[in-house]
Amino acid sequence: MTRHSTATWKRAVGAAATAAACILVPAGQALAAPATEGTSAVSEGSYVESVETVSDREIVINVYSASMDRTIPVEVILPADRSEPRPVLYLLNGAGGGVDRATWKRQTDLLEFFEDKNVNVVTPIGGAWSYYTDWQQDDAVIGTHKWETFLNEEMPPLVEAELNADGNRALAAISMSATSVFNLAIHKPGFYNGVAAYSGCVQSSDPIGQQFIKTVVEVWGGAESVENMWGPLDGPGWVENDPYVQAEKLRGTKIYMSTGNGLPGIPNDTPANPRMQNGQADLANQIIVGGVIEAATNYCTANMARRLYELGIPAVVDFRPTGTHSWGYWQDDLHKSWPFLADALGI
């Protein structure tokens, strides 16, 4: 792998949860390793079960996953112009996996935003509380999870063949799955042109990161044990799936990260936010709970940005001056990061 030449430096300034962080992160440099064309072998037995037409721009591709022995609906927004092959943006939902109301489609202007863009936007439905990873053991409560196998091996060749895609692909995700996009890229170097992580925490093997993941998987997700995912907390599985520790393997992948600082902002943390279905109750929960969570992701993002800078790996990092852990900000993040994603995808 060749070294990156000195080019543009982007200043990323933000407050971490416990201390101010002022970080210089290299950006805008030519990357040494473009995404590889094609995909690796499909897990034996996976196939496209059916394709449903939702509208002239929306379809659902139902993919049978051999590794999980079930059919996964994959929502697709088709490119504005389909006269030639187009790239794919894999856009992952958060902790609920897209089976609840907390989804890109329900909570953002996703359809309108991509109305004039020449990209396939692909979102699998399922994987709640799974961290979109391959669990070492089945969980008695939340079942079998082999999501990394599905997302990295089974789904892409099938879906991209169905869409006549051009071989360029990127990942973007929020919250829980903002950890996943880094691990997916780390475990398959060169496969993704770029990753974008909004409000994620990528520290997995230290006590703070483990407690955060344990809360998501066991408390919110109700799983039997978080150790069914990557094994004992002091075992190698947690280190292997820690993007902070494994950051060197991200070299050659374009990286974008964003986070708020937990402080409420305007208009997303006010009654003017149309997502506040239950009025003051929703607003109070977003400001209090969402503020605490976003302060934690700010801390994690600052640490990861510092780690990438120390390794000389280019990244664009956006520390927003305000913001809770909520959809209004993630819609803004998607809009703001689109030029980065479009560049990564060759659009």
Image (cartoon, rainbow, N blue to C red):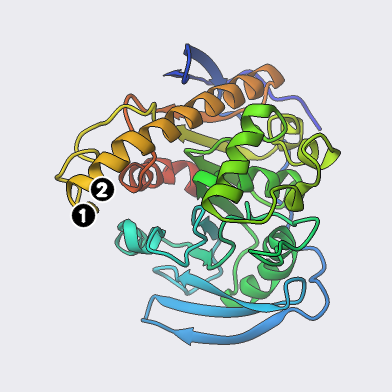
In this rendered view, identify the residue nearer to me: 59 or 143. 143
Give left or right: position of 58 versus 147.
left
Residue 177, percent from left and from top: 56, 49
Under circle 2, the secondary element is helix
Q: CA distance from mark 2 to mark 1?
A: 5 Å
* Residue 345 appears in the figure: no
Give the residue at mark 2.
282
Q: How many marks?
A: 2
Q: Residue furthest toward the left?
A: 272
Under circle 1, the secondary element is loop
Residue drawn at x 39%, y 58% is 102
- Image quarter where the N terminus lies is top right
Q: Given the image, on which type of amino acid does mark 2 rest?
A: Asp
Residue drawn at x 62%, y 47% is 181
Q: Quadrant of residue 145?
A: bottom right
Residue 278 tag number:
1
Q: Quadrant of residue 323?
A: top left
Residue 274, percent from left and from top: 19, 53
Label 2 with label 1: CB-CB less than 8 Å: yes
In this rendered view, identify the residue nearer to me: 6 or 193. 193
Residue drawn at x 73%, y 72% is 68
In this rendered view, identify the residue nearer to me: 212 or 247. 212
Residue 320 tag number:
none
Q: Given the image, on which type of amino acid does mark 1 rest?
A: Asn
Give left or right: position of 21 versus 50.
left
Give left or right: position of 187 versus 98.
right
Q: Quadrant of residue 206?
A: top right
For residue 11, above or below residue 194:
above
Residue 312, percent from left and from top: 68, 21
